[in-house]
Amino acid sequence: MKSVSRDLILSFESSCDETSVAVIENGDTILSNVVATQIKSHQRFGGVVPEVASRHHIEQITSCIKDALTQAEVDYDDLSAVAVTYGPGLVGALLIGITAAKAVAWAHQLPLIPVNHLAGHIYAAQLVAPIEFPAMALVVSGGHTELVYMPVENKFEIIGETRDDAAGEAYDKIGRVLGINYPAGKPVDELAHRGQDTFNFPRAMDHDDNFDFSFSGLKSAFINTVHHADQIHEQLNKADLAASFQQAVIDVLSDKTVRALREFPVKQLILAGGVAANKGLRDRLTHDIQRFTNTKLELVPLSLCGDNAAMIGAAGEMLYRHDVRADARLNADPGLEFEWLKQPQQN
């Protein structure tokens, strides 16, 4: 028998290479968060292969649902709604989670909540402490780098974004040059802490009059430096290379964020996304936020920085309260952007 005192959201995340199902209570408590990773399957290719990812989602999704319900000690009758990522992401991968979520919602007559994957990353912070508005989020991952201003709940305004490579994507590309297998973010971060910024790589757009980012030039400068050294048989210090690359990334991310905070005063700054696990970035923002006495920094826990269904459940509960619903026509939207209190396009 479902308790009227709590909302239980069964949530699905399958936008890329993690199959995840979770049960979230009242938008802030994790009862279960099952994540089936595919990293080993994609490592031999040096990155995510969409078709391989989709097949793994098909293989894992049913067992993830069962495990999530078992660990949470709930049944379908206890649930209030079903939430699912419908974009952005890999279209085939998204469709697996959407199809499973729609099947559960239809079979058990539960509301279906469509969730933007990036809103999920931001609302992972809600699982640690309430989000206070106005707020700002720096979302940094393998596919996304955005500064998002949130004046009120469920209003997302992208005030800055990457114009080419995302920060995490650049990490993976220079990681291959360093001989580091995918995913390269954590090993490059660890290597960087053993080196010094001696190469002075470019800080693209750092002084431009906007909050946008660009990491393609930095990536190219890094690769060209290494290739030139190879041609003249010069041995470069890999730790110094990693440190120089990482410092350039962190400088731009932090400088742009600080400028955005000056123009958009907020109560809370949220660092979210896979690259939010980067120690160098976390340390830099922890230092820089001290100049803003009225703004708190919320660092999403390392366990929730990567893709997971708990964050989708947290965002889903918020949307549930705002009466955002989808029906059986919900489709994947791989290029989805933020929208405010708007129903998803039904195809």
Image (tube, rainbow, N blue to C red):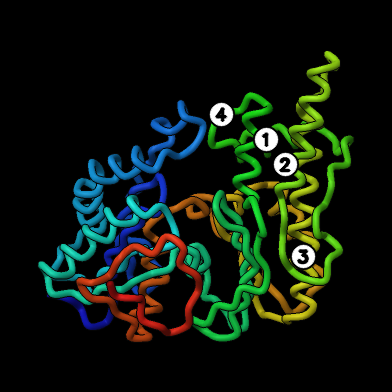
Q: Which residue is mark 3?
A: 256
Work out whether mark 4 precedes mark 2 in sequence or the reverse, and give the earlier one.
4
Q: Tell me the kind of residue under disc 3.
A: Lys
Q: Residue at x 42, y 38 (%)?
A: 49
- SS assignment at label 4: loop
Q: Position of residue 114 (x, y in %)?
A: 34, 71
- SS assignment at label 3: helix
Q: Residue at x 63, y 37 (%)?
A: 173
Q: Which residue is mark 4?
A: 181
Work out whether mark 3 precedes mark 2 in sequence or the reverse, and give the earlier one.
2
Q: CA distance from mark 3 to mark 2?
A: 19 Å
Q: Tell me the kind of residue under disc 4.
A: Asn
- SS assignment at label 2: helix
Circle 2: is it few (<14), some (14-19), or many (20+) Cα within 10 Å? Answer: many
Work out whether mark 3 precedes mark 1 in sequence or the reverse, and give the earlier one.
1
Q: Which residue is mark 1?
A: 174
Q: Which residue is mark 2?
A: 219
